[in-house]
Amino acid sequence: MMIERLSEKNAAPSRVQVLAWRERYTGVTIRLLAMPGDPDPIPSGTLGKVVDVDDAGSLIVQWEINRSLNVIVGTDKFEVVR
């Protein structure tokens, strides 16, 4: 389940949307469902904690497997766990 959609594929989120995501998702645990197109993706099913949202709207995630890799909203698929 993707939690947010952008109005246009590969469209940049607005500043207001980035600020809303930052407030909503920072500190939240997510489960990665798919990371298509990444040459070295995080494995599906891995849990991670959103530590911030960058100005481009990517979720900055610290994964339980001791990796840090951003989630691209609108491309990667994930669900909120808690």
Image (cartoon, rainbow, N blue to C red):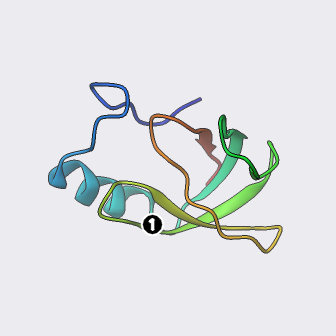
Point 37% across, 65% down: residue = 54
Q: Is mark 1 on a helix, strand or loop?
A: loop
In the image, is 41 to the left or to the right of 5? right
Q: Which amino acid does label 1 sit on?
A: Thr
Toward the front, the furthest residue is 39
54, 24: nearer the viewer: 54
3, 76: nearer the viewer: 76
For the C terminus, give its image quadrant: bottom right
Task: From the top left corner, tell me how far across and down residue 50 is, in percent.
Answer: 54, 65
Task: From the top left corner, tell me how far across and down residue 38 is, in percent.
Answer: 67, 45
Reply above or below: 11 against 45. Answer: above
The quarter of the displayed image where residue 11 is located: top left
Reply above or below: 44 against 6. Answer: below
Point 62% across, 40% down: residue = 78
Q: Which residue is denoted by mark 1 in the rendering?
A: 26
In the image, is 56 to the left or to the right of 29? left
